[in-house]
């Protein structure tokens, strides 16, 4: 539950500060980008259970913690850069 609150707050801060510094189009693009990391963090167990997805290379499930870790990396990527 903490990770959902913290990641949602970080995403909201990204959007809050991106709008005045750039424009609405940049904020919209950032919002679209934030969908995947938030999904990976919030629904890590469910997303780790996906196999196949039209690609034959995904044949086993991924642990939820690994999906969440990848989501956190994507979410914090703008800060790390």
Image: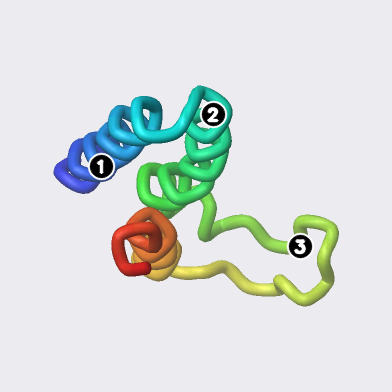
Q: Residues within 10 Å of mark 2 (few under 14, many from 20)?
A: some
Q: Name the quarter where the C terminus is drawn.
A: bottom left
Q: Position of residue 10 (x, y in %)?
A: 25, 42
- Which element type, helix, strand or loop, lies under badge 1? helix
Residue 64 in sight: no
User: Which is in the foreground here, disc 2 or disc 3?
Assistant: 2
Residue in view at x 31 percent, y 68 percent: 80
Q: Which numbered disc, 2 or 1, marks the residue that appears first in the sequence?
A: 1
| Secondary structure under the numbered disc 3 in the rendered image | loop
Residue designated by label 1: 10
Whether residue 40 is situated above or below residue 34 in the rendered picture: below
Q: Residue at x 53, y 35 (%)?
A: 26
Q: Residues within 10 Å of mark 3 (few under 14, many from 20)?
A: few
Pointer 2 and pointer 3: residues touching (CB < 8 Å)? no
> Which disc is residue 52 wearing?
3
Q: Which mark is residue 28?
A: 2
Quadrant in which the N terminus appears: top left
Q: Secondary structure at mark 2?
A: helix
């Amino acid at each position: 539950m903490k990770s959902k609150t913290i990641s949602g707050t970080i995403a909201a801060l990204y959007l809050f500060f991106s709008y005045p510094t750039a424009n609405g189009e940049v904020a919209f693009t950032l919002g679209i980008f934030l969908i995947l990391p938030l999904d990976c963090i919030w629904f890590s167990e469910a997303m780790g259970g996906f196999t196949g997805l039209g690609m034959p290379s995904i044949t086993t499930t991924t642990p939820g913690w690994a999906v969440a870790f990848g989501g956190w990396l994507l979410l914090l990527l703008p800060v790390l850069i």
